Image (tube, grey):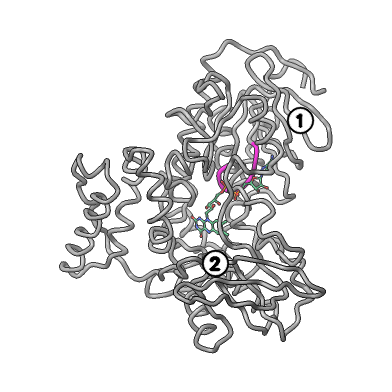
Amino acid sequence: MRNALPPIAVIGAGFSGTMAAIHLSRLMPERPVLLCEKSGAFARGLAYATGCSDHLLNVRATNMSAFPDLPDHFSRWLESCPLDSVALTRSTPAGLFAARGLYGRYLTELLLAALAEPGPAPHLMLEHDEVVDLAPEEEGFYLTLAAGRRRYVAGAILACGNLRAPGNPRSRYAVDPWNAEPLDDLRPDLPLLIVGTGLTMVDAVAALRQRGFAGPILAVSRRGLLPQVHAPTAPWTAPDVPAAARRSLVALLRCVRAEVRRAEAAGADWRSVIDSLRGASIELWRGLPLGEQHRFLRHLRAFWDVHRHRMAPPAAEIIARERIGGGLTVLRARVTGIEDRAGYALVTLRERGVAAPRVIEVQRIIDASGVGRVADTDDLLLRRLMARGLIRPDALGLGLAVSDNLAVLDQRGESGRRLWTLGPLLRGTMWECTAVPDIRGQAAELARTVVSRLRDASPCAARETA
Ligand SMILES: Cc1cc2nc3c(=O)[nH]c(=O)nc-3n(C[C@H](O)[C@H](O)[C@H](O)COP(=O)(O)OP(=O)(O)OC[C@H]3O[C@@H](n4cnc5c(N)ncnc54)[C@H](O)[C@@H]3O)c2cc1C
């Protein structure tokens, strides 16, 4: 790498990192882009690595283009797919829903096309390893990989995605919903417990049945709310929220409810109103005082999530069938105790409105209760960056604090270093930043920001790979 411009690193190759890297490599042919991924699978991430054909996108195919300026890009790609891929899509009155694994194939093809772009030198490079540290050096960083190698990079984008909640629940029978291996030896006679009743639970039930588990499944959450189902919608104009209502959660909720009533009176569906808020939600979120954001997380988040992130109709049918047939029981309950025994765990549940605790024997506990917080993360890179003072959690502790152009803020609140982020790590700052329709524009915009920052800077001395 002597005498070449040092690369810009993109850390994480899920949707966010893959798309940021593709945009960067197109916009900045003069500088290499180093896309690093620890899982072994590029262009998949947590969402699109699944091989379960019942794991469907929870967004219609028509809204899953990877490019903000080419809205029908994914739909056209689907049309060009061979017939065996079409079998991985489900056409419903609410629209077409593709398997998430198929979407992963779409992203992989986009990445392969970017890698094959002709040029004097390969400028998009893949690094199959975990990035475990970034040590500031002049304007850039020395990046350390888990295998111990170090190399100099001119800057970095943290696209590390959804944080997992570490070590929860504490039991040797606890299973990560995204790692199915410990589910190979299930018994048909003992129940399996899922903590959480959202989309991850829906996925877990579908995967368990597809793997042939025929035993009883119990899903619990404090409110016992299941995600709503997609239905046909029509475009609806987002409500004009008065300035006074923008600072109060109660007033905002009233405003949305009034809009839903107006929509229903006009023959439209509540889903159209919720969908219409997508474009406005970041501004609305950022306008809420911190106390109101906290109140939203405590009291409204669960309700918002089930209306905002809906099930594809075929996924809803699986859940309905399971509940009617008695295979799946959903309870409004909290787990108050877990005792590991030989071959099973004894779990104590406190059901809402029931005085006596319920004690059940379960063979596994799947934690589908949601994503983790930055302060509790066991992610090596984020912990090291925090220890170095290079990043800090946002005010709610859900993700990273950033400037308006997505440069991360350091412990002193400054954003001078060439370190940026996007995607789910912006959850606290933007709230709506976890799905493809939110992230695709962010990836394109961030690439433009990074390129203009790097081009504005004085040329950086080239360094050797250590
Ligand atoms: C199960 C599930 C289903 C979803 N379904 C949909 C859907 O249908 N439609 C939709 O629009 N959105 C969906 N989403 C939302 C999804 O989060 C976004 O669409 C998008 O995939 C987020 O991508 P990401 O790259 O930011 O994060 P992730 O997908 O989490 O990817 C982050 C990547 O970074 C890697 N990584 C992390 N740290 C390091 C490191 N230090 N070094 C190297 N690599 C690292 C990880 O291995 C991972 O591959 C779903 C999310 C989940 C979890």
Residue beneath disc 2: 334
The amino acid beneath tag 2 is Arg
Closest to the observer, 272 or 365: 365
Q: Residue at x 71, y 19 (%)?
A: 4
Q: Secondary structure at mark 2?
A: strand
The magenta region covers 11-16
Q: Local crowd at mark 2 within 10 Å, few (<14), some, or many (≥20)?
A: some
Viewer can see residue 105: no
Task: Quadrant for residue 211, please give it.
Answer: bottom right
Q: Residue at x 32, y 38 (%)?
A: 287
Task: Quadrant for residue 308, please give it.
Answer: bottom left
290 is higher (above) or lower (below) than 362 = above
Q: On the rendered structure, is 151 left or right of 12?
A: right
Check the picture and name the quadrant holding the C terminus: top right
Task: Quadrant for residue 5, please give it.
Answer: top right
Residue beneath disc 1: 144
The amino acid beneath tag 1 is Thr
Marks 1 and 2, how far apart in space? Answer: 41 Å
Q: Which mark is residue 40?
A: none
Task: State yes or no: residue 12 in magenta.
Answer: yes
Check the picture and name the quadrant holding the N terminus: top right
